[in-house]
Amino acid sequence: ETIMLQANKKYKLVVNIEECGANLKVRLSNRNGNNMYLEQNVQTLGKYEFDYTHEEGHDDDVRISFEVPRSQVGKGPVCITSVSFIQVNNWKYSLCRCLKLWT
């Protein structure tokens, strides 16, 4: 999913994880995925909130992605129940899909 951001605006990425049988990488990057703006490892179930300020000069088209590293394959399922990306001044882009990642 690609989202258009504005320079110098603050955003919040909220991820709800129902099952977390393996380490999960949560990333916010440019549209090609080769410049990481935010990268966090998640190891337990729960609600996670990540703050992000989009800097001037960064690609305004960004991508939210999730990855279970190869070293974690076979450890157990990861179930993401919801993802919200919120601009701090009340603009909200919500990806309300249940994503089940099997490792």
Image (spheres, grey):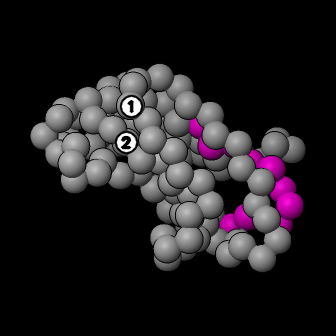
Task: Specify whether residue 81 is in view.
Answer: no
Q: Amino acid at mark 1?
A: Gln
Q: How packed is label 1: few (under 14 Cα within 10 Å), some, or many (20 or more)?
A: some
Q: Quadrant of the C terminus?
A: top left
Residue 76 falls in image quadrant: top left
Residue at mark 2: 24
Residue 4 falls in image quadrant: bottom right
Q: Is residue 11 above or below residue 42?
A: below
Q: Residue, x 64% and y 40% (percent of image)?
A: 50
The residue positioned farthest toward the left in the image shown: 74
Q: Amino acid at mark 2?
A: Leu
| Range shown magenta | 4-14
As drawn, the label of residue 43 is 1
Task: Specify whether residue 30 is in view.
Answer: yes
| Residue 40 magenta | no
Q: Residue, x 80% and y 50% (percent of image)?
A: 10
Q: Is residue 52 left or right of residue 64?
A: right
